[in-house]
Amino acid sequence: MAQIFISYDHDDVWFAKEVRRILESEGFTVWMDDEIGFGSLWSPEIDKQIKEAKIIVVVVTPDANRSTYVTYEWSYALGLGRKVIPIYHKTTTRMHKQLADIQYCDLRKAVPENWKKLVDKATELIA
């Protein structure tokens, strides 16, 4: 079971994989939809992984804000009572109010202390 589910738009897959790499290097179990095998039904698998995760990390970008899939993932997670951590990867001006109301982690620049803040918050929420 993954502790952390990463929600992202596929145009930002390289950044989502970097988030996964950092979190896994800190000992977290992370799940992304690139783990769904060919021929599998992806929608039930995503629902299952969101239900099992303790934290949903949302990579916030303009593309992610327009994505019905990303919106579904974080809103479904909130409905289940999961903790959601938005992380800004690209500046965006329009965001759904429910997601905008959650304090975000700013990773738009490669600032090591912000990566540490993400790891510290994930550690706190999983404890």
Image: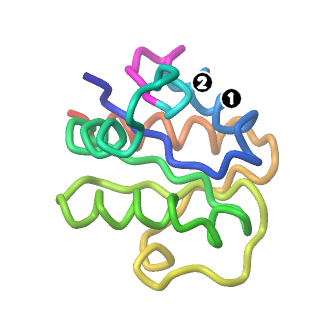
In the picture, the disc for residue 22 is 2
- Comparing 107 with 55, the one in front is 55
Which residue range is magenta in the image?
24-31
What residue is at 18 percent from the left and 59 percent from the top? 81
Q: How far apart are the two marked residues, 1 and 2, measured between alpha carbons? A: 6 Å
- Residue 44 percent location from the top left of the image: 29, 42
Q: In which quarter of the image is the C terminus?
A: top left
What residue is at 38 percent from the left and 39 percent from the top? 122
Q: Which residue, as the protein is rendered here, is positioned at the far front?
A: 39
In the picture, the disc for residue 18 is 1
What residue is at 43 percent from the left and 70 percent from the top? 102
Pointer 1 local density, CA inside 10 Å: few below 14, some 14–19, many at least 20: few
Q: In this view, does 3 lie above or below 47?
A: above
- Residue 50 percent location from the top left of the image: 30, 44
Q: Label 1's element?
A: helix
Q: Quadrant of the N terminus?
A: top left
